[in-house]
Amino acid sequence: MTPEDRFPGPELPQSGPHPQQDLDVLPYGSYFEPNPPSEYQNSPGEQSAGGPDATYSGYGGARYLEQHWPVSGHPIGQGPAYASFLAAERGGNQGQAPAQDDPPTIELGPPITEENPYATPYQPPPADPGPIGPLYVVGDVHGYLDELLAALHQQGLVDGEGHWSAGRSRVWFLGDFTDRGPDGIGVINLVMQLAAEAAAAGGYCRALMGNHELLFLGAHRYGDEPVQSTAGTASFRAAWLLNGGQQHDLERLEGHHISWLSRLPAIALEDGHLLLHSDTTAYLEFGDSIDEVNDAVHDLLADEGADEWWDAFRRFTKRFAFRGDGGPMAAGELLGTYGGHRVVHGHSPIPYLTGEANSDSGERPYVPGPYIYADELAVAMDGGVTMEGRLLVARLPVD
């Protein structure tokens, strides 16, 4: 069976333009690349860190982004990607920095009440719901609501009206609901709705926290407040705008969205699959067990300040740990610590992992389905919807 047979994928709707660069960057114009641990580096005589087989560099690294989206002068940047974003937001005034009198935050929404549509009680699950259903994962959505609905419907997870239709099936979203695409809040609303409907049917729909959830919440909470980054002083709002932040999402953010997003876990284990958002070993810096990692992230979001939030965002923005010669060792370290036999992640688009993103053909990236790599220890699920690839929904295990 070919990948196309297993993940046939209809021509998904195009709900909006794809104007943003696809890999995350920090405010001074360079994608944050970690220094690889010595045990993961290439040994003498092997390909240098700039080659396509390197674990921490290559396609989409700092040099590539700086060539295509140069940033100089203002810490927010003056590159074409940022200028086009401002043009779309301001009706053509390219290159202008956000007005200083434009407040970067909004008031917290009301507490969850009976008027909150997602607090509406659903019928409890049946007393004898039957055997547990299959497990599905959903890659990065980034605000492309129409594409998400089409992909879920294709897999039989929702009906034609966008309501849960999968019984006791289990679904995990791998994070990054907002930014770059046209309707991030609509995506969050849908996932919250499906979580309630799935629970009523005896299944569940759950989600992980991605680096863009940290960025979105940080832009709301801290706005233009300076934070200390490795490149100098930055702010959450600057980074959020540079990475595709949509002002209309921030304006529609309400209290129940914030409460739900803030409680998302960072890591989970299902049927031997270690579910992560980011393809990084930075999770090891937060704890030696899944509970420790999730508790550490939740405690940070509840109590710590802007610099600590920024540091967490920076760590979860790392990528490419499972690519190259050191990839199987890095994936194995995570699996040995947290359990499972295979890592499943989003964050890094498959066209960058395979090298197709460096093609000069001008054609849409070819993404037949999830990408299995690192000696089959890792599965990538970000199909590159923001670069006109695919929004992937897959049943696990994938072969």
Image: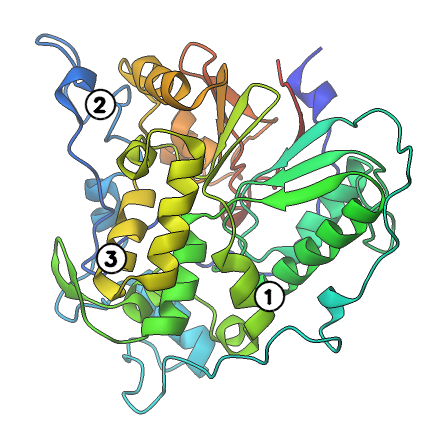
Query: Who's the residue at 73% across and 19% down the image?
Result: 5
Q: Picture quarter containing residue 86?
A: bottom left
Q: Which residue is mark 3?
A: 308
**Amino acid type, callout 1:** Ile
Q: Nearer the viewer, residue 364 or 133?
A: 133
Question: Relative to 153, is 93 above or below?
Answer: below
Q: Which residue is mark 1?
A: 185
Of badges 2 and 1, nearer the viewer stands 1
Query: Who's the residue at 72% across and 41% down the image?
Result: 204
- Circle 1 residues within 10 Å: few <14, some 14–19, many ≥20: many
The span from disc 1 to disc 3 (Cα, nearest Å) is 25 Å
**Amino acid type, callout 2:** Gly
**Amino acid type, callout 3:** Glu
Q: Which of the marked residues, 1 or 3, is nearer the chain's N terminus? A: 1
Residue 182 visible in the shown view: no
Q: Are marks 2 and 3 in contact (CB under 8 Å)?
A: no
Q: Are marks 1 and 3 in contact (CB under 8 Å)?
A: no
Q: Which of the marked residues, 2 or 1, is nearer the chain's N terminus? A: 2
Query: Who's the residue at 46% across and 59% down the image?
Result: 19
* The C terminus lies in quadrant: top right
Position in image of residue 99 (x %, y %): 30, 87
The span from disc 2 to disc 3 (Cα, nearest Å) is 33 Å
Helix, strand, or loop for circle 3?
helix
